[in-house]
Image: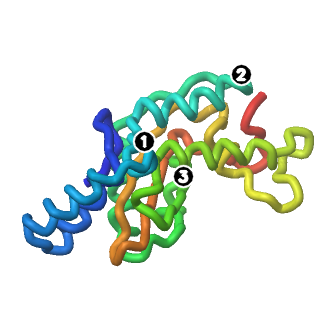
Amino acid sequence: MHVLDRTTYTANQINCELAMERGASFAVVMAAMAMVLAMTSTAAQAQTTAADIVNIHNAARSAVGVAALSWDDNLAAYAQGYANQRAGDCALRHSDRNNYQYGENLSWNPSVQAWTAASSVDQWVAEKGSYDYASNSCVGGAMCGHYTQVVWRDTTAVGCAAVACNANRGVFFICTYFPAGNVQNQRPIN
């Protein structure tokens, strides 16, 4: 459905696919697409490729001296399978936590039009300010685990996917990492 492979995906495409999944007629879908395409907002026109996602990850990793990640289609397929399961409720729940070989970062945006995969990854990277290397913890109870997974030194591959949630409840986005980061009593970087 929305595996972020080497193809670009726009908010317009996700909206149209969602309408098709709901059994809307072709004419209704085409009319909706024409209206959305007529919008001039930059958010609606935003695109993100797998290369963009990897580049954002690798910029954060490079800033702390960690080797680059590569895109993995198998991880993207795993992520897509789980994203599809979340389409009904869009809940930010991790996949099978008995499968600790993979790390995961999840995000949700209430607006299909305003969302890009890059904006989700940027939010995770922005948690850097909440991570304290000296204590290897998040400052003041803030979230920083998404950031530490992004820069985890032993992680070598990433694959991501998105799904438009049912009933216009936004977009669920997941990146899956191998090997998993955020290993207890270890630091993300040397």
Which quarter of the picture shows residue 29? bottom left
Residue 66 placed where, x, y %? Answer: 67, 25
Q: Which residue is drawn at 26% across and 65% down?
A: 18
Residue placed under numbered mark 3 in the picture: 104
Residue 165 placed where, x, y %? Answer: 37, 69
Which quarter of the figure is the C terminus placed in? top right
Q: How far apart are marks 3 and 2 (CA)?
A: 22 Å
Which quarter of the figure is the N terminus placed in? bottom left
Residue placed under numbered mark 1 in the picture: 159
For numbered disc 2, what is the local secondary structure?
A: loop
Between residue 37 and residue 179, name the one nearer to us.
37
Rate crowding at label 3 as few (under 14), some (14 to 19) or many (20 or more) other CA atoms within 10 Å.
many
**Sequence-wise, which precedes: disc 3 or disc 1?**
3
On screen, residue 56 above or below 86 = above
Q: Residue at x 22, y 68 (%)?
A: 19
Rate crowding at label 2 as few (under 14), some (14 to 19) or many (20 or more) other CA atoms within 10 Å.
some
Q: Which amino acid does label 1 sit on?
A: Gly
Q: Residue at x 31, y 33 (%)?
A: 6
Q: What residue type is labelled 2?
A: Gly
Q: Distance between the residues labelled 1 and 2?
A: 21 Å
Which quarter of the picture shows residue 84? bottom left
**Sequence-wise, which precedes: disc 3 or disc 2?**
2
Q: What residue type is labelled 3?
A: Glu
Residue placed under numbered mark 2 in the picture: 65
On screen, residue 121 above or below 84 = above
Is residue 119 visible from the viewing direction of this image? yes
For numbered disc 1, what is the local secondary structure?
A: strand
Tag on residue 116? Answer: none
Residue 151 placed where, x, y %? Answer: 66, 35
